Amino acid sequence: MSKMQKCLTGFLWAVLAVLTAGGGVPPEIERPPQPFLVELLAQERGRWKFESPVGQELAHPGRVGLYAAGAGIADRVGLLLENPEFPGDRSRAEWKEIAPEPDGSGFLIREPNFSMRLRLQPGKGGEIPAELSEIRLGPAPAGRWNFTGLYLRVGGSYRPLELTGPNGSFKLQTGRVGSVFKAGEPVELIAVRRVPAPRRATLILRDYYSGAELSRRPVELAGRVVKLPVEPGRFGSFEAELLTADGCSAKLRLTRIPAPEKVAHEKSFMGINVFQQQHWYYSYQLPLFAAAGIRWVRPWLHWENTWKMQEPERGRFDTSALDAMLRRLALHDQKLEYIFYNYAPWLVPGRSTEMTPLDAEQMKLWEAYVGRIVRHCSPQVTDYEVWNEPDLLAGHNPAFSAGFYAKLTRRTAAAVRAANPAAKIHTLSHANVREWLEAAGDAGVAASTDVVTLHTYAPAEYFVRRELARQKLLDCGGFFGKPQYFNEIGAAGYDGCPEYSGAFPGTSEKRQAEQLVINYAQAMHFAGAEGKVFYFCSLDPRDSRDPSGRTWDSSIGLLYLGLQPKTAFASLAATAKLLDGRTCLGRVEVNDAVRYVAFSGGRAVVWSDVPGVSVKASELGCAPGEAIGVFDLFANPVASGRAEDMTIDLSRGPVFLTGSETPGRRAAAERNAWMAERGRVAAAERQVGRVRPVAMTRNSTAEAAFRIPAGSRVEVRVPEGFPAAVEEEAPDGLFRLKLRAGDSSGAGAIRCIVTLPDASLPAVVRTIPVMVDRTTLVEDGAFDNGSLDEYQLAGPEMFDPAEGAMRLNGPFGSRTHLHCRPPYRSDRPLHFSVRLRGRLSPGVKLSFNVAFFREGWLGTWSPAAHGENSIASEAFRGRSSAIPEELAEWTTVKAVLPAGILNAPEARAIFFLDIRGGRPGDAIWIDNLELYQEREAVK
């Protein structure tokens, strides 16, 4: 063959390889029960290689088996490609045919967002075997279509290519994505059998949450495809298993949920954060969550709602992806909480689109963009959030400060309201940085705010304790009384991977389902009557089976890869069914273990923080004669009767209580009193100025001053051994302390108690840390303030007033961080000291640690440790002090990190306490915690 002939032949093959049928789907093509790519993702879960951190690019390292029924020779491969906005609509689908490669290597399937090679194998047993290899999957926005079906053309007719399933003989599926069924819908399985698989089998149905077997019956697999009706008889998550006499098994998870209530958007508090990988969220996930009762959607940070996708190049403005999302939301009667996040790349060339402060000209362009989007989305969209977690971004770029954020929100709010006066502005999107939140309040963010947005991933047991400290900062920053949207809450849940469960205890599907119900309710206790809660997130962002992908949040989605719902999806639907649209009245702690959150209409969520507990309905306040009902966390009725006769079993997780109004009256009274006290505290706090730490040198003088109302009285408490003399002055409107340092270095905190002229308001406490030739990394290690406000709590920590110390109770499993990340200089020693007392059973691991960061982690020093400690990095090993086994009496432990150990001149220090193991009855008290550096460097 000549060179010209070879070129011509190659050209013709290339043309044939991309031959299409002009978009028309042949009439004989039947849509498969499961979209092909959805089924492939689910079947191969755990085998995918995540080539981007959150699964936007996946690769399969192996081969996947398929087959087409019937013998014959195939000459084409057909692809059924559906419009993501219109799944199942043949009139909007695309049909493509692909010819074999000229070199005999099979069929190369190549689309912008997926590619793979299909090889046919010699036919046998009345079928055409095949395999897929070189599978690479890209992100949904990269392509135009959903890969729905794969077919072979044999003798002019088309046959579907079926995945063989995990066992290679038969598989179970249903005719709907996610295998979710609502009340009133028949539950039907589809068994797909390869010849010569056995014809007789046993069909078993189990309740996934409890593990109980619900039914077992023999079935006849008379044909290649057999429909098998099942009746769970209840709501929840289930596992169906088809088992043959020779031990071959196929399993399928399915979910049955109550039909959602019709709740007006403004009355609904049920929201979800969306996440997507290979399919647009709005194709398959949106209908699933609509069926579960979700009325509000918060989008991801990098897709259709962002300027960088809408106008990647200046002047090329395209909102088609956003418009498709809005149409799908309208179809399913859902509302969008729009996030303004990410600039267009051309606005900040060469800089971050997420954390770059704007100059005057850039800000004008931003305002014009905001107005354009609001006009485009009106009247459908009325809620606009300004940025995501700016407090964390400021840690990466200090110039993206709370002050700049205040400016950004002020200008964005003005642009939004000019375009739509009815729109609401959501601000803060606060993660956890306390100092940033204080600064945002001081900068006046509250003036631009209609709705406060907050993020928390606290477990149910510690949710309230962690949140109270932030609520006080919000109150003092001018946000008191504003509606709150907890638009990120979540808990991890992943079964079937012991390595992940071992690395991250408490991450089972069961616990996730329970945490979801409790924390939706607890969040609403803070959020208020107009508040909302958004679970984070819809889909697992990583593969928790892959060691490189395992993180605390890698399994935080409610759907696995392949869109299989977890157990928590069913508890989400139950929460929507029984609580949504009702006003949260408040939270009550009944005793040391039992809590409830009450809602209007005689509804409540009741649970125990201690396993194996039951509670009498009368203890909850239910009145004699009231007819009450108890439902499990999937909305199944479990008990009913007169209140005086009812004992509620909480050993199997939280329950929903219906029929009694009296617990709600108690909850409302307690919450109203709490809110009134918060209002008084906020009013008092805002009359007194803030204070800052004072740094001094030996024998120097300094002043500390703060604003007070005229007529206030101030009591000053100076601790013993304070390194400076203190004089007080109180001119009108100002309280001033004059400080004169002595000859020695040291540190301490002056406590000022301000009594205001208005006797109805509580006293205000201001603590002023003073450092003399010393940099103190811990300000209130003696807990003189009577609080743990300086710490980012894991949950079990508490202040023990009898000891004036922090206390943690066993069994242990927590990490407590210092809120701030103070500077560290490596040219001088770092001193550590702590007083400890406790009861620790054998095997407890306790360590105090300092991790050093500067553009990445530099190492971790553990100044004190009890039990085996693997946290300290190599350079710092052998520089720890052992915490004694016996701590019945107060014991002081000290350590020093010499200068010059860290391979960097300076860094940020993250201090944390780690404690694991132990038994109930164990406890540890911590006091006089010091971590400091002297000002003078080592010569």
Image (cartoon, rainbow, N blue to C red):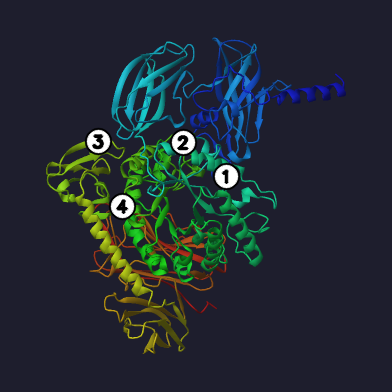
SS of the residue at dot 3?
Answer: strand
Picture residue at 66% right of the left edge, 31% below the top: 110
Looking at the image, residue 171 sits to the left or right of residue 213; the answer is right
Q: Residues within 10 Å of mark 1 (few under 14, many from 20)?
A: some
SS of the residue at dot 1?
Answer: helix
x, y (%) of residue 662? Answer: 19, 51
Picture residue at 20% right of the left edge, 37% below the top: 639
Residue 928 in sight in this render: no
Tell me the distance, in whole angstroms, between the alpha carbons under discs 4 and 3.
Answer: 22 Å
Mark 3 or mark 1: which comes first in sequence?
Answer: 1
Please state which amino acid type lies under the numbered disc 3.
Pro
Q: Residues within 10 Å of mark 3 (few under 14, many from 20)?
A: some
Q: Nearer the viewer, mark 3 or mark 2?
A: 2
Mark 2 or mark 4: which comes first in sequence?
Answer: 2
x, y (%) of residue 507? Answer: 38, 44
* Res. 769 image quadrant: bottom left
Identify which residue, 911 or 77, lies in the foreground: 77
Tell me the distance, in whole angstroms, between the alpha carbons under discs 2 and 4.
Answer: 27 Å
Picture residue at 41% right of the left edge, 68% below the top: 478
Q: Nearer the viewer, mark 3 or mark 1?
A: 1
* Res. 346 image quadrant: bottom right
Please state which amino acid type lies under the numbered disc 4.
Cys
Against 3, residue 931 (above or below) is below
Tell me the distance, in whole angstroms, between the alpha carbons under discs 3 and 1.
Answer: 41 Å
Residue linked to disc 1: 322
Please state which amino acid type lies under the numbered disc 1.
Leu
Q: Which mark identifies residue 287?
A: 2
Q: Which mark identifies residue 584?
A: 4
Please state which amino acid type lies under the numbered disc 2.
Pro
Q: Which mark identifies residue 43?
A: none
